[in-house]
Structures are given as structure tokens and as C-alpha cells.
Amino acid sequence: MIRHVRPKLSCRQCETIVQAPIPSLPIERGRPGPGLLAHVLVAKYADHLPLYRQSDIYAREGVDLERSTLADWVGRSAALLDPLVQALRTDVMASDVVHGDDTPVPVLEPGRGKTKTGRLWAYVRDGRPYGDERPPAAVYFYSPNRKGEHPQSHLEGFKGILHADSYAGFDAIFEGNQVSEAACWAHVRRKFFDEHEKGSPLATEALERIGALYRIETDIKGKPPDERRRLRQEQAKPLLDELKAWLEATLRKVSGKSDLAKAMRYTLGRWDALNRFLHDGRVEIDNNAAERAIRGIALGRKNYLFAGSDAGGERAAAVYSLIETVKLKRPRSRSLSARRPRPHRRSQDQPHRRPAAVELGRSAHSTSHRVARRTLTKINASASKVKPRRLVVGWLGAGAGSVRLPGAIFQRRPQRGAGNGGDRGSLSPHSVIWPWGGESGRQRKVCPILSSVQ
């Protein structure tokens, strides 16, 4: 906590009183600083934690923050960030190539006791596949419905190539000569994949032909646009010509009402837009950049369930624009194979043995650390008297004085058969005696080790 001290000073001759001005704060006459506000926004829109969960988390640490207070902070923070969001939108719409997509968002409809379906529109600039030096960025817009007038207003003044799906609302944008359509081969592949799962050999052949196009894209990723265009003309164009001839010949042999025929007509009906990537090295083969940008919204939607109002949807679009842009610029996380193994998992070549004594790993200067050391002594003493037990990671205590335990000992309960109506066994933590100092003297309480076992 930061405390601002502003002493008042008075002149003995003229009796004038002076005082330092109040420091600038994000919220006028408010207590939260920029760090706390940023933490609330990131937790809600990047980590998908609804405000009521954040309120409960703060309450466990002894901080009373009501959900209404957090909601007010989110609204005021979004208003402060609006100039930055507008500048980001202007920068993205000035690009030559943009990926566009939308996703539904349930929005609470006041007075009716139910939700309506709003939309969040995502527009992404990502030139990394063809070596563009401009940093990637993503912007979002909210609309209360999916009418075509909304993307038309978003893209007003945009000139270039728009990656999009087959949504009819984009058709008016492509009518002029300002915007060219680049269709998505991932959408095409998805339709054939659905038929492939039903056992269709024709769909399997279509997937193999489309897969050959993607293998070429993998090889030319990161190369300059001119070289990408040349390699596509040499390698991908013959494959596309063969694919079109195969689709036209096969379509005459299958039932016109089947889903496979619908997938073929979908592909042939958008053939020019699907071939746009052949003639421009800046164009991608699919619209996956936009679909990745709305993935975080889909995860958040499963947690907060709905937006409180249309104004809440506008705030979400603004904050998502900044957070997703930062996520595009950060390096990708390490693969699972490169992560350090869990401490309680032993390798295949490591012999099974009793759990070794656990240590804190740092000096215990505070009272909490000294208490934890005594507790660990009891745990290690009991470890040699019982059968081999599983070692898991846990925390001892709560709040700022909590101490992380490298291991906590669990013992499997006796297994009960199905005839007894019981489960097949579970893991129960050993409770440890936690000497807790209170105002009235030292008290002894039983404190379970806060851990969980899958």
C-alpha cells in the first residue's frame, strides 16, 4: 500500500496555508493505483476470471473488494484507455492485409430476465509469415447483433485484402474495387473433414489434396512476398488446377443433396477468392490468424457466461484489443516437452523409495518459517514410520505469511470392494499441528495441508 503524506505549511507573517497537490491517480479521488487496475483487467480478460471470483480471491487475503467496486473500476479503466484503443484501431485499419472474423457473446437484456446474442468482431494484422516488420496487432468491435452494417462501418475507408469467411455481411464490402476477398481454406477443409469422419473415401482424398497445399505453405513461411508468390505459382497452382478438375468430375457422381456435394459446391463457388493467395505473397492460405484471436473470447465466455449490458460489450472489445495485441507480440511459450517435470513424479529409471526428507530451501527468519520448520520435522519423522506415500506440492498457512512446502505427505485409505458400496480408495492429507500466535497468547489449532490430488 502506498501512503501519500501531504503536510500543510502556513506562513507566520501572512498566514497563508500551502499544501502539495494530490498526486495524479487513474481514478479521481479513488484508491486503486495503475498496477491494481491492470491486474484486475488482465485477470478478467486474459486469465478469464470473472469479477465475483476475483472478489473471493481478494477476500481470502483479507481485502474486501465488492464485485460492484471492481465493475466500476473496469468501466473507468476502459474509459481511460479509449484514446489508446482508437489509435490502435486506426493503425490496424491502415494496413494492406487484414484478417476478419466474429464470435457470439451472450449479453444480459434488462427487463426480460434473459440474454440476447451480441457479437464481437475481430480484425487482425499479422505480417510475420511474409517477414513484415510492422508488429502484429488485433482490434475488436462490439455490436448488439450480426447485421451487415456493422462490419461495413468498421471497415469504412479500408483499402486492401480482407481475409474472411462466407458471411453475407461482407459482400457489400467486396462489391467495390477497394477491398478484395481472400477466402479461407481451413473452412473448406473443415467441411470435408466432417464427411471424412463419417467414412467417406472421397472426403479423405479431398483432405489429402488440401494437405499438399498446406505442406507448401509450411516450407515458404517467413520468406519475402515475391518469393512466396513465385513458389506458389510453381508448386501450388498445378495442384489447385488438378483439385478443381477433380471436384467438378466428382460432383457429377455424388448425390446433389448430400453433405459432400454441398462441400464441393461451397469450394467451387468461392474458387476465385480461395485462389487469391496464389497471386499475392502477403495473403495467407486461411483465416486462422483471426480465429486464433477470438479463441480467448471463447474461453472467457465459458467463465463469465454473459456480458452485463451493451456497454459491457464495448468495454470488453476495448480491453481485448490491448490484451490480444500484447499477446501477439510476446514470444510463444515453451512446449510441454521442454517443461520441468513435476517434483513428485519419478522417472522410469529411478528406483521406488520412501519419501525423502523435505526442506524449505531458504532461511527461516520469520515466525512463519520457524513454525513451518518445526512442522516439517514432524512430517519427516512420521515419513519413516509409514508405508511409501505419494509426494505432492502444497502450501502451509494462508495470506502473506504462507510458506510453500516442497512436499506434503498423503496416505491412501484402505480399498473397499464394490460390494461394500464404497469407492476404490482416495487420498487424505495428514493434518499437522499449527502453533498459531494470537493476541491472547499462543493457541494450538489443527491446520490441514492445503493440497489436492488428482
Image (cartoon, rainbow, N blue to C red):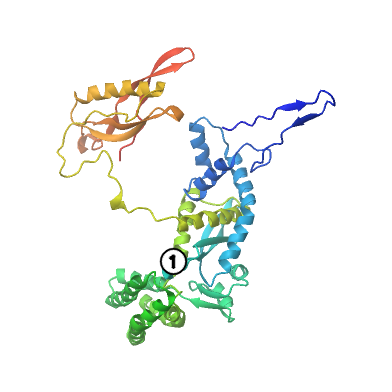
Q: Position of residue 137 (x, y in %)?
A: 51, 61
Say which element carries label 1. helix
* Viewer-proximal residue among 248 and 213: 213
Q: Position of residue 180 (x, y in %)?
A: 53, 78
User: Would residue 350 appear left or right of 233 to someone viewing this image?
Assistant: left
Q: Position of residue 82 (x, y in %)?
A: 63, 54
What's the residue at 64%, 32% (across, down)?
Answer: 4
What's the residue at 36%, 77% (across, down)?
Answer: 260
Vertical position of residue 241 compared to residue 291: above or below: below
Q: Which quadrant does the N terminus fall into? A: top right
Asked whether the viewer can see residue 143, the reply is no
Vertical position of residue 12 compared to residue 117: above or below: above
Q: Quadrant of residue 428?
A: top left
Query: Could you tell me the amino acid type at mark 1?
Result: Arg
What's the residue at 27%, 24% (across, down)?
Answer: 379
Please tell me how crowded label 1 is: few (under 14), some (14-19), or many (20+) other residues with Cα within 10 Å. Answer: some
User: Would residue 96 appear left or right of 262 to someone viewing this image?
Assistant: right
Vertical position of residue 187 compared to residue 405: above or below: below
Q: Which residue is mark 1?
A: 128
